[in-house]
Image: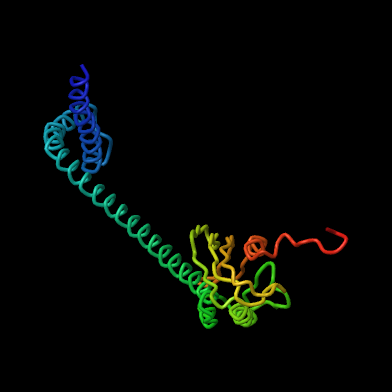
Amino acid sequence: MLALDLRLEALLRPVLLSLLMSGLVAFVAIVRVAGAPPAFGVWFASWMSAWIVAFPALLVAQPIVNRVVTALTTRNSANDTLKETRIMNTTTIEKDTMRAARMDALTQFYGALSTGDADKLDQALIAAWDEEPRNPGQGPGREPMKQFVAGVRQALPDLTIEIRDVMFDGDKAAVRAEMRGSHSRDFFGVAATGKPYVIRLHEFHTFDGEQIAYTWHLEDWFGFLNQIGAWPVEPAGDDR
């Protein structure tokens, strides 16, 4: 039944369309020639004559037109899909390139602390970089951070930092890292013990382009003091 309805629809559409078009064309042609609306009989005869030609012509032309339209729309659709794919690929490449550059900035940042090569910060940080909390006596900016790196390397010369996880979200990155070394020199007012330490770092960075603009940092310094035997503090005198 459905197949019959589809065949009937396929036949009725060209019949009705050819009737409408041939009737209109016949009427306009007679008016142009005679200069006045035709009598019904004249118009009807002309209409049928035109329809006899129009109907089979439409039957022949319709499949061709359908194929042409399908080909054009498919091509346009394919072009649109290709354009969207290119845009998506370009955006993905740009994001991947930016993320790689920012990952490199993080690597340079922690690499400066691990190696003492403060010049790595020129690539990692913007000139006006700042942090929270700031280190005691340290002002904002990349140059004061270079001085801090030098001071840390003097106190903890074998310090190394290894990035464990990085999560990017827009212009921000969350970093989980691990710092290790040995307490070979005085630090935090505690005389060198030679004991090894391993502490966790959890830090958040905001980027300006490919460089770090701001850093929120949290290190497990209580864990450090505990591992070198300086925490908890032994009570003295009457406090024992």
Quarter of the picture containing the N terminus is top left
Residue 25 point in image, percent of width and height: 22, 38
Quarter of the picture containing the C terminus is bottom right
Q: Is residue 63 above or below residue 171?
A: above
Residue 67 point in image, percent of width and height: 17, 43
Residue 94, picture quadrant: bottom left
**169 and 63: which one is in front?**
169
- The way the protein has been coloured in the rendering is rainbow
**181 and 193: which one is in front?**
193
Q: Residue at x 49, y 59 (%)?
A: 165
Residue 190, picture quadrant: bottom right
Residue 60, picture quadrant: top left
Answer left or right for 17 relative to 141: left
Residue 7 point in image, percent of width and height: 17, 24
User: Quick one: which residue is furthest to the right in this view?
Assistant: 238
Figure disc tally: 0
Answer left or right for 240 relative to 112: right
Residue 31 point in image, percent of width and height: 25, 39
**126 and 196: which one is in front?**
196
Answer left or right for 187 relative to 56: right
Answer left or right for 110 relative to 72: right
User: Quick one: which residue is furthest to the top in this view?
Assistant: 1
